[in-house]
Image: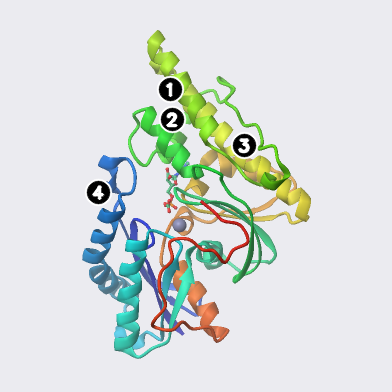
Amino acid sequence: MIVCGIESSCDECAVALVEDGTTILGQVVATQTEFHAPFQGVVPEIASRKHTEWILPVYRQALEHAHIDNSQIDAIAVTVEPGLAGSLLVGLSFAKALALTLGVPFVGINHILAHLYAPRFEGPLVYPFLGLLVSGGHTIIARVDDPFDIEILGTTIDDACGEAFDKVAKHLDLGYPGGVVIDRLAADGDDEAFAFPIAPLSSERHRYDVSYSGLKTAVVYQLERFHVRGAVDDMANVAASFQRAAIEMLLGRLFQAVADTGIGRVVVGGGVAANSYLRRRLGEAPQIEARMPAPSLCTDNAAMVAGLGYVALERGITSPLTINASSRVPGFRRPYA
Ligand code: KG4
Ligand code: ZN
């Protein structure tokens, strides 16, 4: 079965053709980064307008890459939640029109569940596992029992992990998106040069949650002190110390979840999953069997949407063409940021 997946929840406009949920026949991921960079963050209106311009050419190019035509598509899967409402609606409306025109089944997909399915393209997933999903929009530690059954254990109470990297990069004047630049700069720095705060949140309710606002403020104060003394060349030390603190905060919560659940299998996803410090630490952790997919499967793409769509359709799950988009998902046990 060939499923056409469509993803437009944030600033990636993506279409993929996937066979039987496991083989990517062709895909295109068109990123809007350059249009948001001047604003140092994703501007929702720009994102929806770009999706409106790009969705049809991206779809046509994905068909070309897959060497198939319209008539070979068996079903349409599209991200319906969570994400930027305007952006989601562009992909969703396009997907509905396509399903109607082609007369094929249609299914709406949750973006978080799709991320947690993405590593399936590199080999079978063994359930249950703990999912660590960290990007510019999400910071999630979840117990995953099945592609459609997850429990959010922890999240952030303020900024998303990638957002913290982006904001610190902004203060360091490193450009946008900042995660990859901080990662590179940190390689030349001493990650113990500054003791930035990584104290766990105190109450039991936040057992697996993180908070980045205190860390971000500490880094900004440190930078201001540097500027006063004119010692700005120590940026690599600041980057390395921040990176260590940001990732250790996350790992502390994750390791707690591993200890509490007895589940050592960990699957990572999201843009921050490309972080070299995170990958090294997870690779070394003795109690963890980490699945760290290629960065192209960690970041937003439509193959994961098509793949999970296939699983849904195999289980007889479809969506009505009246389905709407949601920017947040009230259905999960915990809210997430
Ligand atoms: O998944 P993604 O491409 O887009 C969404 O946010 O949905 O993630 C982008 C985020 C940005 O915040 C970026 O700074 C961060 O992932 N990122 C990194 C690295 N590469 C990307 N953060 C830390 N280290 C990296 N190597
Ligand atoms: Zn995402």
Q: Is residue 98 left or right of residue 131?
A: left
Q: Give the residue at mark 4.
A: 35
Q: Give the residue at mark 3.
A: 248
Q: Which mark is residue 235?
A: 1
Q: Earlier in the sequence, mark 2 or mark 4?
A: 4
Q: Secondary structure at mark 4?
A: helix
Q: Nearer the viewer, residue 18 or 43?
A: 43
Q: Amino acid at mark 1?
A: Met
**Above-or-below relation of 162 to 21:** above
Q: Secondary structure at mark 1?
A: helix
Residue 188 visible somewhere in the drawing: no
**Above-or-below relation of 152 to 33:** below
Q: Secondary structure at mark 3?
A: helix
Query: Nearer the observer, disc 2 or disc 3?
Result: 3
Q: Give the residue at mark 2.
A: 185
**Above-or-below relation of 59 to 12:** below
